[in-house]
Image (cartoon, coloured by chain):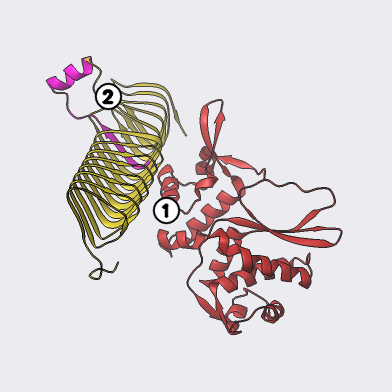
């Protein structure tokens, strides 16, 4: 991307602008962009809305932001809340807070602390969550590491290494459990090479090495290499193939 | 296009690949998304694949993955053109096209008769394939070539079939996006049906 010849765009206070091609775009306060935005860095502090798509090297959201079109960036960072009503394509996605993606998410790396909800599929080489996630269709990632703090749901998971844990049981966790606020994952199918699960309900888990940990309820396990099951796990059917 | 399907489980058993590999290759676009066919069975939802195509593709990936990176492989399987230009001699030497068809092509088209960018090679290769079947005449080859040069760019890298249909000795050429179903009236016959993505893949193998 060529820089230098292009202008910066700054909205301070409250304002709106049409879209366009810029160097750096900064919104401090409240701002609205009424069109597609192409820039190097896009940073918003406060509240912002983009009525089009964004193509940039980096997008940083501090506060609340809503984007109507496709987001194509190398780095997408959210501190607060972001809503994208189309696809997100990126190299690196980091969410501290909450992100809502109405399309599909594809990125080399996805790191979530808080929560994410994705309407389409999600594809990544590394996908890690501390918190909760909701994916309507498929999560396909090389390395999946989930620390469950909230109830999560996904239709299918596929990947190489899949680890789903629920961090230690403090007194607070036990209280949450009584009120049904504790983290649990439900899925239709989970398929991978190395799978370790805790507090997961699934219809079927297929893979090479499978270890079913405490709190799981699995209808059927199909494994090739090895299988282990915790005594606090329920596995109805288990076959080696 | 009813074809034999293979379930995911059978596929992994048969080819010896793991779930991890299958999903990785899907992420890397080595296996097109529309080959994953979801169907309900009595055991719930299952995934199936077009049997011949997926088996052929996996064999190819397995045999080439030691020499090429996954990204290079993805490039080979993608329906997007490559950035390459061959001379007339190179095109002949790599069996992309025979001299006869090449001369015929030069009579139809303008441009440097010794430089063949990928796009031209691609049209040439399809023309060659179609003429080699012996099903179409040179005159019909012209229609085919015209259709491709005029209309293929509009598909913008999307997969499609190229068809030549003949009835009562009159031939017509179509480009049809895939997957799609077609039916012809009696007496009309599809004499040529080539898949663009397959042709592209074959050509890329010859070029690289």
> Which residue is rendered at x = 50% and y = 59% of the image?
B78
Nearer to the camera, B72 or A135 = A135
Question: Is residue A219 in view from this perspective?
Answer: yes
Q: Tell me the subunit letter for badge 2.
A: A
Chain given the colour red: B
Q: Tell me the subunit letter for badge 1.
A: B
In the rendered image of this protein, does residue A37 appear above or below residue B132? above
- Residue ID for mark 2: A214
Q: Colour of chain A?
A: yellow
- Residue ID for mark 1: B28
Residue A62 lies, in percent from the top left, at 18, 45
Question: Is residue A224 in view from this perspective?
Answer: no
> Which residue is rendered at x = 68% and y = 69% of the image?
B146
Q: Residue furthest top?
A: A178
Quarter of the image where one finds residue A4: bottom left
Residue B14 lies, in percent from the top left, at 54, 44
């Amino acid at each position: 991307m060529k820089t230098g010849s292009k202008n910066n765009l700054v909205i301070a206070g409250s304002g709106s602008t049409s879209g366009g091609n810029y160097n750096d775009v900064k919104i401090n306060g409240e701002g609205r962009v009424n069109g597609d935005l192409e820039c190097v860095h896009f940073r918003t502090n406060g509240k912002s809305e983009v009525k089009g798509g964004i193509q940039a090297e980096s997008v940083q959201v501090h506060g609340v932001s809503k984007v109507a079109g496709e987001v194509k960036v190398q780095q997408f960072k959210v501190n607060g809340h972001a809503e994208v009503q189309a696809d997100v394509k990126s190299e690196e996605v980091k969410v501290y807070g909450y992100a809502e993606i109405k399309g599909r998410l594809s990125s080399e790396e996805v790191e979530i602390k808080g929560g994410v909800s994705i309407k389409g599929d999600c594809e990544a080489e590394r996908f890690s969550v501390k918190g909760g996630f909701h994916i309507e269709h498929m999560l396909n990632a090389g390395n999946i590491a989930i620390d469950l703090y909230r109830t999560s749901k996904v239709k299918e998971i596929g990947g190489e290494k899949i680890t789903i844990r629920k961090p230690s049981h403090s007194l607070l966790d036990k209280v949450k459990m009584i009120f049904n606020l504790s983290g649990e994952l439900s899925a239709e199918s989970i398929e991978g090479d190395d799978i370790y699960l805790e507090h997961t309900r699934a219809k079927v888990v297929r893979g090479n090495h499978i270890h079913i940990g405490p709190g799981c309820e699995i209808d059927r396990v199909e494994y090739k290499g090895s299988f282990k099951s915790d005594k606090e796990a329920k596995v109805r059917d288990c076959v080696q193939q | 296009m009813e074809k034999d399907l293979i379930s995911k489980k059978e596929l992994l058993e048969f080819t010896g690949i793991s779930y991890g590999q299958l999903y990785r290759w899907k992420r890397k676009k080595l296996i097109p998304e529309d080959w994953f066919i979801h169907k309900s069975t009595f055991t719930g939802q299952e995934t199936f694949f077009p049997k011949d195509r997926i088996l052929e593709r996996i064999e190819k990936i397995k045999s080439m993955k030691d020499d090429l990176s996954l990204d290079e492989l993805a490039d080979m399987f993608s329906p997007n053109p490559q950035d390459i230009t061959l001379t007339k001699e190179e095109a002949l030497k790599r069996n992309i096209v025979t001299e006869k068809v090449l001369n015929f092509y030069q009579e139809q088209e303008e441009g440097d008769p010794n430089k063949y960018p990928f796009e031209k090679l691609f049209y040439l290769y399809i023309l060659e394939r179609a003429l080699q079947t012996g099903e179409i005449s040179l005159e019909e080859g012209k229609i085919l070539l015209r259709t491709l040069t005029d209309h293929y760019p509009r598909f913008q890298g999307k997969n499609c079939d190229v068809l030549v249909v003949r009835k009562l000795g009159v031939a017509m050429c179509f480009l049809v996006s895939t997957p799609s179903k077609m039916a012809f009236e009696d007496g009309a016959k599809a004499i040529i049906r080539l898949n663009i993505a397959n042709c592209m893949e074959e050509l890329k193998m010859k070029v690289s």
